[in-house]
Image (cartoon, rainbow, N blue to C red):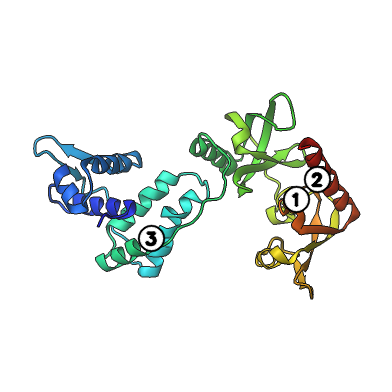
Amino acid sequence: MKTSRISRVIQILTALQSGQSYGVNDLTGILNISRRMVFRDLEELRKVGVPCIFDNKNHCYRIDQKFFLSAPNLNDREALGLLLLVHKARNHIYFPFRDSALMAALKIENDLPEKTKRFCGAALEKISIKADPQGKLDLLDQKFAQLLEAILDKRIITFSYDSPVEQEDRIIDLQPYHLMYNNYAWHVLGKMGQQVHVFKLNHISELRILDKYFIEDEKFDLSEHLGRAWSMMPEGRLYNVRLRFLPEIAHSVADVQWHSTQTVEFQDDGSIIMEFRIDGLNEITWWILSHGDMVQVLAPEALRQKVIKIAENVVRQNT
């Protein structure tokens, strides 16, 4: 019976750190896989920084004993919770330093007690997370590291920004405050003048940290800034939003806490009336449209008209 990729990697690490000499043929026998797969797994380990060294004299692979640290005292659930995040959720959320996180997990896995290691290996094979769509983001680690450095040092950054609503790139000077993952993409929040703005990292290029420092506004609070925005773009006006979802999707919609102000009332026909008190209408408009003809806007009228206008444009463009 062939092992999963995660189990293979753990077994290779365990074998190579044991102090014994293992050649490619030895590893193919242990794992019951082809030589090609052994070479591929060894290369994957090298890519994330594990020093798999080939000993030309003895024709075998080894790992420096000093590379791995002693594992903390973790029980089965603690170890599985950590490894689940790294091995499974790492492809669910496009977070920075994923290779570094994998490296940390491999170090911990390698030195876990055999009983815990077997439990985690068996459990991980039976757990999957379907990845959400993610915005493409080149050089995430580099951009993230630069932005984090600027935020912590309170230094102004400058970058070229490819705005989806403007024809030409803008040059932005920003006082960066915070990094946030939202709606399948990473964003940086910061001040330009007296206003807080949000920029997507995948639209940023030519990023530089300037030798200019700023004094952070001590009154700035992220939670207060986001306030009752549907997602992360407050517009400065509160609305009472009232929606009706048809019975076909009522339960699936009601199962999710979409907003902190959310209330749900089930109707006799199986539909639900869902209400929110939110800041701005633009963000929630697209969420409503994602439910197609299964939702009806009851209030406010301004939101109802926005949805109707976009729906009419869709019909016009497809007829």
Residue 226 in view: yes
Q: CA distance from mark 1 to mark 3?
A: 36 Å
The residue positioned 69% from the left and 60% from the top of the image is 258
Q: What amino acid is at disc 2?
A: Ala
* Residue matched to label 2: 311
Disc marking residue 289: 1
User: Residue 28: image x %, image y %?
Assistant: 19, 47
> Is 256 placed left or right of 7 in the picture?
right
* Residue matched to label 3: 124
Question: Mark 1 vs mark 2: which is more N-terminal?
Answer: 1
> Is 47 placed left or right of 315 in the picture?
left
User: Residue 24: image x %, image y %?
Assistant: 17, 43
Question: Mark 1 vs mark 3: which is more N-terminal?
Answer: 3
> Is 9 placed left or right of 252 in the picture?
left
Circles 1 and 2 in contact, beta carbons < 8 Å? yes
Question: Mark 2 vs mark 3: which is more N-terminal?
Answer: 3
| Quarter of the picture holding the C terminus | top right
The residue carrying pointer 1 sits among few (fewer than 14), some (14 to 19) or many (20 or more) residues within 10 Å by Cα, namely some
User: Residue 266: image x %, image y %?
Assistant: 76, 73
Q: What amino acid is at disc 1?
A: Leu
User: Residue 15: image x %, image y %?
Assistant: 19, 52
Tell me which corner region of the image, top left, top right, bottom left or bottom right, holds residue 177: top right
Q: What amino acid is at disc 3?
A: Leu
Disc marking residue 264: none
